Image (tube, helix red, strand yellow):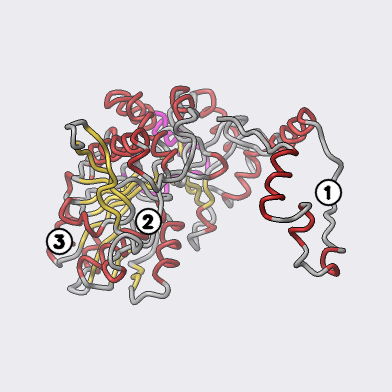
Amino acid sequence: MPFIPNTNADRAAMLTTIGVESVADLFNDIPSSLLAHASLDLPPALSELELYQQADALAAQNDSGARMPSFLGAGCYDHFVPSIVRHVMMRGEFLTAYTPYQAEASQGTLQVIYEFQSLIAELTGMELANASLYDGASGLAEAVLMATAITGRNRVLIPPTVHPNYRRVVESYCQSLPIQIVDVGPAASQSAVDLASFLDDSTAALVVQQPNFFGIIEDMQPLAEAAHAKGALLIAVVNPMTLGLLKPPGEYDADIVVGEGQPLGIAMSLGGPGVGLFACKKKFARYAPGRIVGATTDAAGRRGFVLTLQTREQHIRREKATSNICTNQGLFALAAGTYLNAMGPSGLRQIANLCVQKTHYAAERIAALPGYSLAFDAPFFHEFVVRCPWPAREINAKLHEQGIIGGCDLGRDYPGMDDCMLLCVTEKRTKAEIDGLVAAMSVQR
């Protein structure tokens, strides 16, 4: 339904109804001394055409992945988005990012969310998925709160191989709560098995990322067994795109699974917004944050959808609430569901294979350059860390001059890794673009 502004007659009727003569009368309570300085220093008005031209000129100042090949990942990935995703998202029936509060009147939206939940549960190998959260980072924070509520413990292990932004969000959530976030070793220690030594009888959860922030793939099964032996939960942070090839967390007995759904048909959009994925074992359903849509039948036997569980304080007794999160990314849950349906299992597997093959080609070419080497000797998916002959920020500046968006400068978050760059290669990158990156990185300082 297009936006139609109020007519002069509409405004006059509204003013008459509330008993004032003009819009200015609505501001009579503001002292005139303040109103005298309320004029805004705005440029002259523009026509619609002029406004579009100015907006386009401003947008052109951004060096986006649409204009330059991007090898920057670190949580936000440049994957191809099929046109069907945008066509479905832009339908007027769905074009809102907000959750319906009168949900039963929005059967189409509820069905979309139900199907999204089903797809995420199948993709992760978990028994239950919720109606999404804001993003992957807030999803992890909610998982930590949930784990402490389930176990009655307050100690959570988060290694530095978990995305640094995710760790910061968890720390922000927990700063006023009696929850201890334990730092479990330096970033250079990449063996996940070593994390088991930090577990004790007061540990609520062990958080692992697969692949981890450095792109490394590890065996999660021993960690799950070690955590459960101590009565702790295993929280897995996953990239959903990797699940086209890698073992889903349900198969290595993860208790809670979170992740960022942006790779599933959502554009990078200068870093957001995305959609938070959240799944868990069925026995933890009443501790799960947010909402869960269920299928049912009405009095006439017709299939319908309802909000089945809502575990925030507005809907249940406050002392039993595990979260105050109040909504979900409905529009992007629709995008992710549309993408997964369009791709199907074979399509998702094919994209994952392309990412792996192109990434390993790039890694081999770069590691062969003088002064460059792979920082870790471990299997990786579509991201890898390169140790560079000079600071990564300087190399990125040189790449930018040649029209290439480089990798993530790890020195910003990890002391002592100023010469390390996290590079990402998705299915969109061509051989010519990868060869161009290698040629640009071969230039001496």
Q: Quadrant of residue 445?
A: top right
Relative placement, left or right, of 223 versus 97 is left
Seen in the image, is 209 located left or right of residue 390?
Answer: left
Q: CA distance from mark 2 to mark 3?
A: 20 Å
Which residue is found at the position 30% from the left and 28% from the top?
A: 349
Which numbered marker is on residue 162?
2
User: Where residue 156 sits in the image (x, y, percent)?
Assistant: 29, 67
Q: Nearer the viewer, residue 133 or 202?
A: 133
Q: Residues within 10 Å of mark 3 (few under 14, many from 20)?
A: some
Residue contact between numbered discs 1 and 3, judged by CB atoms under 8 Å: no
| Label 2 crowd bin: few (<14), some (14–19), many (20+), radius 10 Å | many
Look at the image and give the residue range highlighted in magenta: 357-378
Q: Is residue 196 left or right of residue 59?
A: left
- Disc 1, SS: loop
Residue at position x 44%, y 23% in the image: 84
Q: Is 169 in front, or is 392?
A: 169
Q: Nearer the viewer, mark 1 or mark 3?
A: 1
Q: CA distance from mark 2 to mark 1?
A: 45 Å
In this view of the protein, which residue sits in the foreground, 117 or 412? Answer: 117
Find disc 3 in the rendering and name its residue: 228
Q: Specify the amino acid type for callout 3.
A: His
Q: Earlier in the sequence, mark 2 or mark 3?
A: 2
374 drawn magenta: yes
Location of residue 116 with respect to 307 vertically, above or below: above
Q: List x then y, in percent, for residue 187.
A: 40, 60
Q: Which residue is mark 1?
A: 42
